[in-house]
């Protein structure tokens, strides 16, 4: 790193939970804390797709297959009812308009996370209690299913949907400070 950054608090939301795990492997001495915001915490050798309920696997497989470039865009109904279920229709529509297709390959690649799970970096899990992207509960949910994979971690909770950064940015910022403190 040419900027000599240290003492980094790195936050990953949803898919980006996989990204911050791999960044932590690459620069562990630069990171003070990892924050997983309703984020995927995969088991070693697992893909993001592997951690989804079967109905989402089928939907995303279909969306990628039907595109001409192996990408997918979340259907508006799913965005509205599942990802941004705590916002009014106008906010759901305006935020959806900013989405772009995303490559599906990173969703199906299996990740080697052995090094990540050996790192002593402190971790926090920020859980939005109305997030229904993954069905609530132990079998599929963000917490406790994903969060408990971190081992020792700080749990911070707040009301909100998966896309709380649109519906309650100030509340989210406050909880991010709590999750990132020492």
Image (cartoon, rainbow, N blue to C red):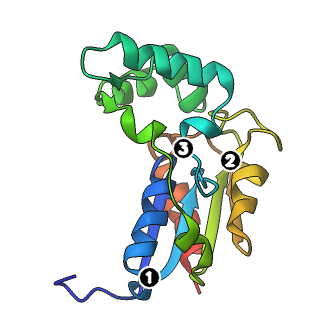
- Nearer the camera: disc 1 or disc 3: 3
Which is nearer the N-term, disc 3 or disc 2?
A: 3
Q: Are marks 3 and 2 in contact (CB under 8 Å)?
A: no
Which is nearer the N-term, disc 1 or disc 3?
A: 1
- Nearer the camera: disc 2 or disc 1: 1
Residue 72 placement: quadrant: top left
Label 2 – label 1 distance at C-alpha: 31 Å
Q: Secondary structure at mark 1?
A: helix
> From what the image shows, is residue 178 above or below residue 48?
below
Q: What residue is shown with label 1? A: 28
Q: What residue is shown with label 2? A: 159
Q: Residue at x 38, y 75 (%)?
A: 26
Q: Residue at x 69, y 53 (%)?
A: 146
Residue 147 placement: quadrant: bottom right
Q: Residue at x 73, y 71 (%)?
A: 151
Q: Is residue 2 visible?
A: yes
Residue 74 placement, left or right of 3: right
Residue 82 placement, left or right of 29: right
Q: What residue is shown with label 3? A: 47
> From what the image shows, is residue 3 above or below residue 178?
below
Label 1 – label 3 distance at C-alpha: 22 Å
């Amino acid at each position: 790193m040419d900027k000599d950054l240290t003492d980094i608090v790195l936050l990953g939301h949803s898919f980006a939970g996989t990204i911050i795990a791999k960044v932590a492997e690459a620069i562990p001495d630069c990171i003070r804390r990892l924050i997983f915001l309703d984020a995927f915490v995969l088991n070693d050798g697992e893909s993001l797709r592997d951690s989804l309920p079967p109905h989402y696997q089928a939907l995303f497989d279909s969306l990628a297959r039907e595109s001409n470039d192996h990408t997918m865009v979340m259907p508006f109904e799913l965005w509205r009812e599942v990802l941004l279920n705590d916002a009014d229709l106008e906010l759901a529509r305006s935020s959806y308009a900013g989405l772009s297709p995303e490559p599906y390959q990173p969703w199906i690649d299996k990740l080697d996370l052995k090094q990540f799970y050996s790192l002593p970096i402190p971790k926090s899990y920020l859980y939005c209690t109305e997030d229904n992207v993954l069905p609530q509960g132990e079998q599929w949910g963000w917490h406790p299913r994903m969060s408990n994979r971190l081992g020792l971690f700080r749990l911070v909770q707040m009301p909100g949907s998966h896309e709380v950064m649109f519906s309650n940015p100030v509340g989210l910022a406050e909880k991010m400070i709590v999750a990132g403190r020492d």
